[in-house]
Image (cartoon, rainbow, N blue to C red):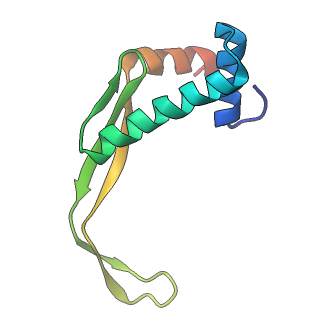
Amino acid sequence: MKGATLTRADLCEAVHEEVGLTRQDCAGLVERTLDLVAEALEQGETVKLSGFGVFQVRAKRARMGRNPKTGEPAEIEPRRVIGFRASQVMKARIDRALGD
């Protein structure tokens, strides 16, 4: 893997090298996995990946904000956002890797 960003292509290549499936099969596997996560989130489900973290859809209430160009007050509509909380295992792994 190269660069500071891990892409779908990088994931596919890593699966190909580790598992030995064809690149096309690996691409399908990665795509299906990401689709399953997205579908679960669309249904409002929590996605928990043990040792990695938890993805959740959270509701944000309406609030007053400001237009950055004009400084005028503007209402921000209620919305749903995706949140991620890393597991303790993942946090420890990152701390070790980055020498924090």
Left or right of 79: which side holds 100? Answer: right
Left or right of 80: which side holds 84? Answer: right
Image quadrant where residue 17 sits: top right
Q: Residue furthest top?
A: 19
Identify the residue at horizontal 64%, vertical 8% (top origin).
19
Q: In this view, does 64 lie above or below 15?
A: below
Residue 94 placement (x, y as % from top left): 54, 21
Left or right of 59: which side holds 71? Answer: right
Q: Nearer the viewer, residue 21 or 74?
A: 21
Image quadrant where residue 30 sits: top right
Q: Please tell me how many numbered marks the rendered image carries.
A: 0
Q: Which of 4 and 30 is in front in this view?
A: 30
Which quadrant would the N terminus be assigned to in this image?
Answer: top right
Residue 49 placement (x, y as % from top left): 37, 22
Is there any visible trace of residue 100 in the rendered image?
Answer: yes
Is there any visible trace of residue 6 in the rendered image?
Answer: no
Q: Which of 98 and 29 is in front in this view?
A: 29
Residue 62 placement (x, y as % from top left): 22, 70
Q: Nearer the viewer, residue 56 or 72?
A: 56
Identify the residue at horizontal 57%, vertical 22% (top origin).
100
Identify the residue at horizontal 40%, vertical 34% (top origin).
36
Q: In this view, does 62 lie above or below 58?
A: below
Q: Which residue lies furthest to the right in this view?
A: 2
Residue 31 placement (x, y as % from top left): 54, 34
